[in-house]
Image: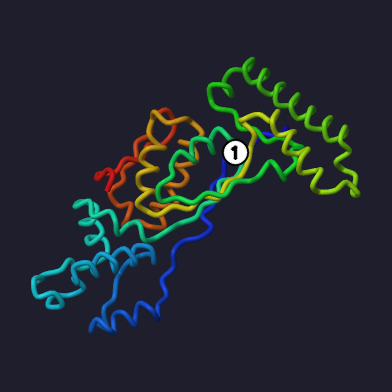
Amino acid sequence: MHVVEPKVFLVAETGLIPEGVQEYLDWLGIPDWVSDAPSDAEKLIEICGRMCYRSFEPGLNKNVRKVREGNKPYIYNILKSKHGSVTEHPVVTFIFADVSRVFTHELVRHRQGVAISQESLRFVRLTDLGFWAPTVIKEDKKALEIMTNTIQYLEMLQGKLSQHFDLDDPKKPFGIKKVVTSAMRRIAPIGLATSISWSCNLRALRWIIQMRTHRSAEEEIRVVFAKVAEIAQQRYPNIFQDFSTEMVDGLPEFSPEFSKV
């Protein structure tokens, strides 16, 4: 058994195709239009939003005599007016490592605007079990001892079953290993450290950060999404410009000015 700390990695994000954007602007008759967006994700939101009203500049739409200049004020108006559909275009992908299956069971409850791939314990044999202790356990010496002994015992059972089925035999067919490994995971603790890949659009991310850093959320998911929120605010400052932070029970709670955009 080894103690872990949940980790968050931003591994992918939506990127613009410059030549495609330029071809569109040329077709529209505004080849010199530029955006001061700090990221491709926020520039994409601006392009898609301005396309809706043809509001890149005055005169393109005869009904529009004035347009908002700058990506930040433009996106702020989108958030304020709750024109949230355009914030669904950019997608980001995180890998959460050393998180528990308690966390992943909570995470998969969010289904709209997300994609998920999880480490498979049908294929991955358990040996050295990773474990993260919540504060209520960590700060109680006896409780931590009980929980640690339990994890170590379950780890020992994984080893015994592996030996019983001779899973380290290089001649053992993988099909048999898969069946046995799948059976063995049934006595793995739900607090077992695992990994999960998670993609979502920025509209979904705003809502999930609000929900999962809230003081009423489970501790581990608050820890993870506080890290997600810090990454999101730094990398996409304009789409998260309305979020404020308050420390509650030792963890940051992120709250937007405009909820459920």
Looking at the rendering, which quadrant does residue 154 occupy?
Answer: top right
Asked whether, in this view, residue 227 is left or right of residue 2, the answer is left
Total number of numbered labels? 1
Asked whether, in this view, residue 221 is left or right of residue 27, the answer is right
The residue lying at 30 percent from left, 69 percent from top is 36
Looking at the rendering, which quadrant does residue 251 occupy?
Answer: top left
The scheme the figure's colours follow is rainbow
Q: Nearer the viewer, residue 173 or 85?
A: 173
The residue lying at 74 percent from left, 38 percent from top is 126
Position in image of residue 202 (x %, y %) = 38, 54
Position in image of residue 226 (x %, y %) = 44, 41
Position in image of residue 131 (x %, y %) = 65, 33
Amino acid identity at mark 1: Glu
Vertical comparison of 119 with 145: above or below = below
Name the quarter where the N terminus is drawn.
Answer: top right
Vertical comparison of 32 with 254: above or below = below
The residue lying at 29 percent from left, 69 percent from top is 47
Vertical comparison of 212 with 216: above or below = below
Q: Nearer the viewer, residue 245 or 87?
A: 87
> Mark 1 highlights which residue?
5
SS assignment at label 1? loop
The residue lying at 34 percent from left, 36 percent from top is 246
Q: Nearer the viewer, residue 187 or 2?
A: 187
Q: Residues within 10 Å of mark 1 (few under 14, many from 20)?
A: some
Position in image of residue 59 (x %, y %) = 12, 78
